[in-house]
Image (cartoon, rainbow, N blue to C red):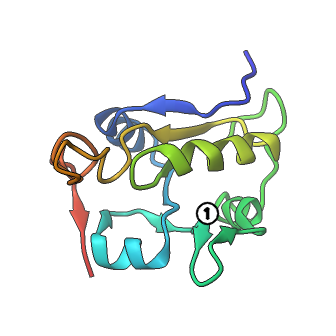
Amino acid sequence: MTTDLPHSLTPQEAMDLLTEHPAAILVDIRSTMEFLFVGHPKGAVHVPWIDEPDWTVNPQFATEIRKLLLGGAVCEPGQLCAPVVLICRSGKRSLEAGKALIQDGLSAVYHVDEGFEGDLDEHHHRSSQGGWRFRGLPWEQC
């Protein structure tokens, strides 16, 4: 079944997929400042979808992801592709980036629906009701 949306995973489901499939890659697509100073999942590779200073979509995003997949391998229908798991702050950017990868021909694309920090709570705080960090999964900070 072909879809134009990445498969949605909870943070724990993403961790399980990464553990079960050693070839899978976890890509943190947040800005460089978010990745460095807010923290990121342990083992995540950083490829920004949108980054400072211009805050425009990275025109090389799909190419950079393909380079991570063994030198730019093309995933054809019926061909086994390494899973790509995308994570952002709350799951919104990773959904959009995942759509772009699928349009570019990748098929095993997933996104963490709660992101790294989750949605805002009633006090406008993140990491209090969802996300990779809230769920107690391994992360680090520079």
Height in image: 28 above or below 113?
Answer: below
Question: Mark 1 = which residue?
Answer: 49
Q: Secondary structure at mark 1?
A: loop
Q: Position of residue 84 (x, y in %)?
A: 57, 47
Height in image: 49 above or below 8?
Answer: below
Which amino acid type is marked by label 1?
A: Trp
User: In front here: 120 or 75?
Assistant: 120
- The residue depicted at 42 percent of the width and 32 percent of the height is 9
Quadrant of image for the N terminus = top right
On the image, which quarter does residue 119 sit in?
Answer: top left
On the image, which quarter does residue 14 sit in?
Answer: top left
- The residue depicted at 39 percent of the width and 48 percent of the height is 90
Residues packed near mark 1 inside 10 Å, few (<14), some (14 to 19) or many (20 plus): many
Q: Position of residue 63 (x, y in %)?
A: 77, 64
Height in image: 42 above or below 105?
Answer: below
Q: Position of residue 10 (x, y in %)?
A: 35, 33
User: In front here: 70 or 29?
Assistant: 29
Residue 9 in view, yes or no: yes
Would residue 92 be found to the left or right of residue 97 on screen? left
